[in-house]
Amino acid sequence: MNLEQLSVIDLSLAALLVAALGLVQLIMGLGLLRSLLMGSVRMTLQLLLVGLVLKSLFEAANLGWVSLMALIMLALAGYEVTARQKRPIKGWHGYTIGLLSMGVTAATITLFALIIIIEPHPWYTPQYAIPLLGMILGNTMTGIGLALNHLTQTAWSARVKIEARLLLGQTAGEATAELRADALRAGLIPTLNMLAAAGLISLPGMMTGQILAGAAPMDAVRYQILIMFLITAANGFGSLLAVHLGTRRLFDERARLRLDRLTARKA
Amino acid sequence: MLFEVRNVATPFSAPMSFSLDAGQVLTVFGASGSGKSQMLRALADLSPHEGAVFLKGVNQTAMRPEHWRKQVGYVPAESGWWADSVAEHFSVAPKAQWLAALSLPPTLLEAPVERLSSGERQRLAVLRALSIEPRVLLLDEPTANLDDANARALTQLVLEYVQSHQAAAVWVSHSGDERLRLGERSLEMPAGPAALPVQGAPA
């Protein structure tokens, strides 16, 4: 079975559904027409652009270009982690903590999967490397963002409690034990939900895509199981590292809680 | 000399210097906003600050922060409670006679924190600090939520602790009567904008 090609007319018909939704919104006076329109146009342009980039990347299949693409994806994901927090750590520290914890784990796990598990030839074959990294980054970005957001927001609101513990002679580590555990949990909950829902409530996107492209269901399922394990590990280790680095930044060398290192609440 | 403070200043409080021998209590007063609490935070090394603080001649910076805070116990005006029951906040159980002296029933230790009145919280916060036996006590208006009888009882307990443990105390108080009861040593924080120099807020 080969993938049925989609023509411009096919896509226009699908777009018509969104246009109809926009019309209904307009009649009901809900005022979401503009956002729907902008979002749809933006999505189409972004995906077409990435399609072009991937097309030339696949043709070149060169380690340098694949690495450059991976770095750009990483930098954007690092920015997203900070942007999703209400009280991110100020300055380059905040960006670096997100980027470092994501970069180290996502890169290690993607390389491990490519070189030891999947073994395409060459190992950096972009058809494998880029989607794999993309899926791992997309998920760790969410997890690390949630973990750091929980850490910084809770530290902000629990200042009196944390300082009370410091005043009784606890170390910064002791005074934040529950906080750090809760932040890790917050980062891992979407992944745990994903594991529980896989196959029953949702058919994961990659597996669906492979089946549509003509892969045998059991082959697609094996790939999906691999991805699930990789995502879970990357998310867990990434959140651990982020919470560790984030907590260190919340305290100074005299174990003082330094909430002045967090940005004021964003609107 | 037990406790020595040399030119300790924060972005919100003017430079202060004083020293205390064992058994002494220093009361601190001054307009609100003059940075009394900020100075106490600096003495407990809870906020970045300038100047130097010494305990028995040992510089604050030469001691691990958790060791310093065990020996220089600070009780802020607002006490923090992080666990469910009162007892979980005590690493060392308070002495029975201390509870009795402050009219606190021993069963209160098993009570959930949210059932405590503000006066009970305040007395328990002082006991929590006393139970780890600090050499210096920093108290920020510890009798603010207490009726007169309980305020006197707390004053008496702290004075006895300071004598029996050869400790010292810095006590922020708005009440002139209370300051008289605590002894003759008193310090006024310089008020107003003079206490708010543009020293550059900590980054």
Image (cartoon, grey):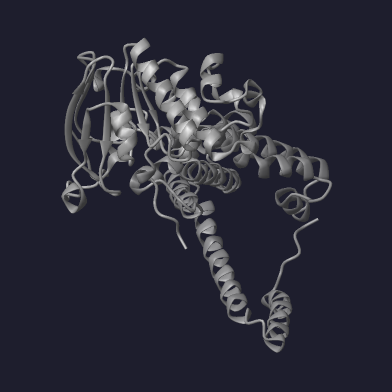
Q: Is residue B6 visible?
A: no
Examine the rendered structure and indicate whether residue A204 appears above or below residue A37.
above
> In this image, A19 relative to B148: left or right?
right
Q: Is residue B145 visible?
A: yes
Q: Nearer the viewer, residue B185 or B122?
A: B185
- Percent position (x, y) of residue B186? 22, 32
Examine the rendered structure and indicate whether residue B4 appears above or below residue B33.
above
Question: Residue reaching furthest bottom?
Answer: A27
- Count of numbered badges drawn on the protein: 0
Examine the rendered structure and indicate whether residue A134 appears above or below residue A237.
below
- Give the quadrant of residue A26: bottom right
- Give the quadrant of residue B46: top left
Q: Nearer the viewer, residue A35 or A111?
A: A35
Could you tell me which quadrant the N terminus of chain A lies in? Answer: bottom right
Q: What residue appears at the point 67 percent right and 86 percent down from the top-left corner?
A: A29
Q: Nearer the viewer, residue A8 or B184?
A: B184
- Percent position (x, y) of residue A63? 45, 42
> In this image, B88 relative to A78: left or right?
right
- Percent position (x, y) of residue B115? 64, 37
> In this image, B26 relative to A126: left or right?
left
Q: What residue appears at the point 56 percent right and 14 percent down from the top-left corner?
A: B96
- Give the quadrant of residue B130: top left
- Percent position (x, y) of residue B162? 35, 17
